[in-house]
Image (cartoon, helix red, strand yellow):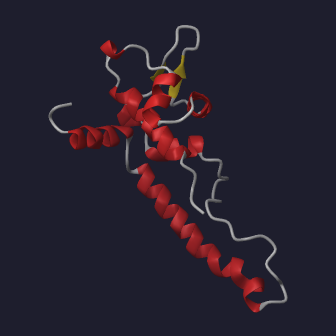
Amino acid sequence: MQISSRFSVAVHVLSLLALQREDDGLLTSERMAGSVNTNPVVIRRLLGQLKKAGLVEVRPASGGTFLARRPADIALLDVYRAVEVVEQGQLFSVHEQPNPACLVGRHIQAALDTTLQRAQTALEQVLAGVTLQQVTTDILAQAGPSS
């Protein structure tokens, strides 16, 4: 089991928007979907979540999507919170209804609570410390001087 790919797809889409040049034309959900290699419906759903979080502006009539903030002002934690359907403090969950007659089943939740909360806090701190600007800088560095 793994965390969904919504987060990485959302960062991909936001990176496209951040690196968009005026002469590239409008960046539509179809063009974004081509880069991500997914269905445009998936992109439109993500864009709806990103718009609700105040990270993008979507202009359906004229077409195109634009960042609502500068890339340096968008932390990856903002993106994560916008697109992941995880309750605050609930990244990890322990399986439901373990057997209370079992020593482990009776105490597993309490034994894991502190560790899982620390792991979630660590994830959030790392994501809060990285901006979309840093991601796009890394993308351009990976692409090399020919881009």
Q: Is residue 78 visible?
A: no
Residue at the (53%, 36%) spot, across then down: 38
Residue at the (34%, 16%) spot, across then down: 24
Quarter of the image holding residue 50?
top right
- Where's the C terminus, which quadrant? top left
- Judge left or right: residue 96 versus residue 133: right
**Relative depth, front residue between 71 and 47:** 47
Q: Looking at the image, is 52 positioned above or below residue 129?
A: above
- Where's the N terminus, which quadrant? bottom right
Residue 104's spot in the image, x, y percent? 72, 87
**Relative depth, front residue between 71 and 2:** 2
Most extreme residue toward the bottom, as rendered? 103
Q: Looking at the image, is 7 positioned above or below residue 30?
A: below
Q: Looking at the image, is 4 positioned above or below residue 74?
A: below
Residue 29's spot in the image, x, y percent? 52, 24
Residue 71's spot in the image, x, y percent? 37, 33
Most extreme residue toward the top, as rendered? 62
Residue at the (61%, 59%) spot, across then down: 91
Quarter of the image holding residue 82?
top right
Residue 102's spot in the image, x, y percent? 79, 90
- Judge left or right: residue 37 versus residue 100: left
